[in-house]
Image (cartoon, grey):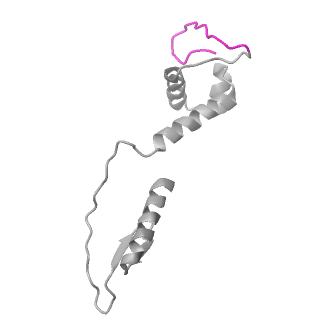
């Protein structure tokens, strides 16, 4: 493997008995940062630097998952809502969802179902 720096430097990498190079998370982050700045395809970057493409693709997939994971430290959030009764309409709570979908809750026994739906959507989107 070569290092992702602009200066020429030789790095000896330790391998296990199967010839696999062991890298630290910091080293993987350095490779991925260099890849993002390179403008190359993943396969070309991996080939150029002597990294198995499957390994490199796995690193990229892991990074994507980590970056898209919800922030576990984020606490509850509050959203301002407006409750109004439309002329001739039934009383209830209309929850507008992203993308234009909405849910109307007009009975107290429906709240647990809507809460479960919102929790599901939070983790799946």
Of residues 51 and 62, the one nearer the viewer is 62
Relative to 4, residue 87 above or below: below
Give the image location of residue 125, x and y in percent. Answer: 49, 55
In the picture as drawn, the residue positioned furthest to the right comes out as: 18
Q: In the rendered view, does 56 fall on the left or right side of 17?
A: left
Which is more toward the observer, 124 or 2?
124
Q: What stretch is highlighted in magenta?
A: 1-17
Identify the residue at horizontal 55%, vertical 32% (top origin).
39
The answer to whether residue 111 is visible is: yes
- On screen, residue 84 above or below 3: below
Determine the residue positioned at 63% across, 20% down. 49
Quick one: quadrant of the N terminus? top right
Asked whether 16 falls inside the magenta stretch, the response is: yes
Which residue is depicted at the point 51% across and 55% down? 124
- Find residue 50 and report its horizontal and vertical position in percent: 67, 19
Name the spot of residue 82 as percent of width and height, x first.
Answer: 25, 72
Residue 81 image offset from top left, x and y in percent? 27, 68
Q: Which of 66 and 92 is in front in this view?
A: 92
């Amino acid at each position: 493997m070569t290092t992702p720096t602009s200066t020429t430097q030789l790095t000896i990498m330790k391998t296990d008995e199967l010839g696999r190079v062991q890298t630290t998370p910091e080293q993987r982050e350095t490779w991925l940062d260099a890849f993002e700045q390179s403008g190359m395809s993943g396969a070309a970057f991996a080939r150029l630097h002597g990294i198995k493409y499957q390994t490199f693709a796995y690193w990229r997939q892991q990074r994507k998952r980590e970056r898209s994971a919800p922030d576990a430290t984020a606490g509850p959030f509050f959203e301002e809502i407006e409750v109004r009764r439309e002329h001739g309409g039934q009383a209830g709570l209309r929850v507008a969802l992203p993308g234009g979908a909405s849910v109307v809750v007009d009975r107290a026994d429906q709240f647990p179902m809507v809460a479960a739906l919102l929790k599901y959507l939070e983790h799946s989107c």
